[in-house]
Image: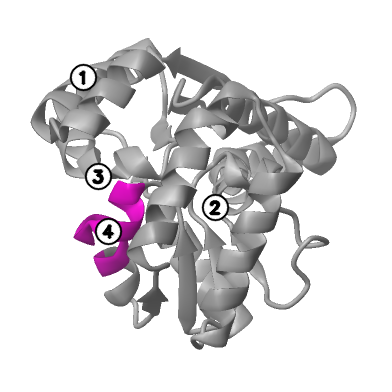
Amino acid sequence: MLTIGLLHGMSSVATVDYYRRINERVNERLGGHERAELLLSSVNFGVIERYVRAQEWDEAGDYLASKARGLEVAGADFIVCGSNTMHRVAPAIEAAISVPFLHIADVVAKAAHQQGVRTLGLLGTLPVMEADFYRDRLAASGLSVLVPDQVDRHLVDQVIFDELTRYIFTDQSRAQYLRIMEDLAARGADAIILGCTEITQLVSPQDFPVLPLLDSTGLHVEAIVEISLASARSELQRS
């Protein structure tokens, strides 16, 4: 089993979800009491939030790169970052390590192609919805991306930072998200990316049966476990 280096703490809500899902999925695959070989670097979300608000991406990149190096030194075989937003500094992280880095947008793109969807509505923080780093990564694989209008982008971002990262999940915010998702569907989206790792705890496929939901957390976790267990399966076959 390969050792996962999980860079997280952005936020603790999503960190707990990642840790739980990774271990549950490993156990589903291997049975018994099997769980993941995992190293976690949980950063101070307050530091990250200040970098995001001030758009201090170089500083954010240096901060997360140092944490990623620490995971590699500690024995991680590959590195993952559980925050869609902080993939804005993925190049800095990749430059700082010698082990592979699994990019969350590549995982989402692969799932979109497998499901035969090409025009994707994107929900996430303002950097995810407005900057090029995420949308261009999807466009490079032949996918089109739609985002909410400016007012709704700010609403989606505000709910993430003011509510979801604080374990606040309200019917009112869920209704607003569903309204925005319906608008994206009306504009031509044939799937919706839940491009923030907390959104999946607010909106589920049962809430929105209109279109497929590409849950970035779930897709990322599945890819992480697949990589980690690639060697585990061969070890089990030899025993």
Looking at marks 2 and 4 on the same chain, the residue that comes earlier in the sequence is marked by: 4
Quadrant location of the N terminus?
A: top right
In the image, residue 67 sits, relative to residue 154, either above or below, namely above
Looking at this view, is 216 or 37 the one in front?
A: 216
Crowding around mark 3 (Cα neighbors within 10 Å: few <14, some 14 to 19, many 20+) is: many
Looking at marks 3 and 2 on the same chain, the residue that comes earlier in the sequence is marked by: 3
Q: Are marks 3 and 2 in contact (CB under 8 Å)?
A: no
Looking at numbered disc 2 in the image, what kind of residue is underneath it?
A: Ser
On the question of residue 220 being in view, the answer is yes
Label 1 secondary element: helix
Horizontal and vertical percent for residue 130? 27, 58
Horizontal and vertical percent for residue 24? 77, 33
Residue highlighted by disc 3: 88
Looking at marks 2 and 1 on the same chain, the residue that comes earlier in the sequence is marked by: 1
Q: Nearer the viewer, mark 2 or mark 4?
A: 4
Label 3 secondary element: helix
Label 2 secondary element: helix
Looking at this view, is 93 or 202 the one in front?
A: 202
Q: Nearer the viewer, mark 1 or mark 4?
A: 4
Q: Which residues are magenta?
A: 126-136
Q: Is residue 55 magenta?
A: no
On the question of residue 1 being in view, the answer is no
Horizontal and vertical percent for residue 56? 13, 30
Residue highlighted by disc 2: 216
Q: Nearer the viewer, mark 3 or mark 4?
A: 4
Q: Are marks 1 and 4 in contact (CB under 8 Å)?
A: no
Q: Is residue 131 magenta?
A: yes
